[in-house]
Amino acid sequence: MTGYVATRWYRAPEVLLASRNYGQPIDVWSTGCIFAEILGRKPIFPGTSSLNQLQHIINVLGTPKAANLEFIQNKKTRNYIQSLPCTSGTPLSSLFPQADPLGLDLLEKMLAFNPKKRITAAQALKHPYLADVYITDFDSPAQFQVKLDVDGDSKFNVIRKLMWDEMLYSHPELALRRRCRPRR
């Protein structure tokens, strides 16, 4: 299991299970957790440890079938999950009764336990739930790796100032609001 970090609640099962296959599905999982938090106004998987986090995930999604554990390379880890009490999970429609069924469909696909069966970011953007906001002009992925000019040693206020300046680029009228200015 991985050690403690503040983002435990957004960790994908493959991260919790120390898989070496890190990729885009981890980001889709985390985005799904944030989407669920927006729908329910609280974290969907508020684990207190890595094992407890995994239990929260299984309580909601249900015990994964053997076919959904093939991404786990460690046999002992696979056996551990299969030894857990079997549960069918909690329907997302019960957790989020006010949510649009298309939104729940997207969320279910984002929170697939097996990363190989999880929706991709490109597929998620084209999901019918996002049809009203998806802009096809921005359909192509970046043709190069995006590298940010913020180093790990940057002070919080420097980053805050950069974000403020970026916001002012789109909303210059906010520069007049003294209360909104970041501390220096």
Image: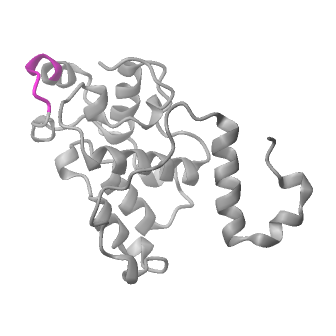
Q: Is residue 58 left or right of residue 47?
A: left
The stretch drawn in magenta includes residue 74 = yes
Q: Is residue 98 left or right of residue 177?
A: left
Q: Residue at x 84, y 54 (%)?
A: 180
Classify 88 as above or below 85. below
The stretch drawn in magenta includes residue 53 = no
Q: Residue at x 39, y 49 (%)?
A: 91
Classify 92 as above or below 106. above
Which quadrant is home to the C terminus? top right
Which quadrant is home to the N terminus? top left
Give the colour scheme shown: one colour
Compare residues 64 and 173 and report the one nearer the observer: 173
Q: Residue at x 54, y 47 (%)?
A: 37
Q: Residue at x 42, y 79 (%)?
A: 131
Identify the residue at the far bottom of this view.
Answer: 137
| Total tally of numbered discs in the picture | 0
Compare residues 150 and 140 and report the one nearer the observer: 150
Q: Is residue 17 left or right of residue 137?
A: left
Measuring from the top left, give residue 104's x and y in whole percent: 42, 60
Measuring from the top left, give residue 175's x and y in whole percent: 83, 64
Corner quadrant of residue 86: top left
Measuring from the top left, give residue 26's x and y in whole percent: 31, 43
Measuring from the top left, give residue 48's x and y in whole percent: 49, 20
Compare residues 50 and 138 and report the one nearer the observer: 138
**In this picture, which residue range is highlighted in magenta?**
72-77
Corner quadrant of residue 63: top left
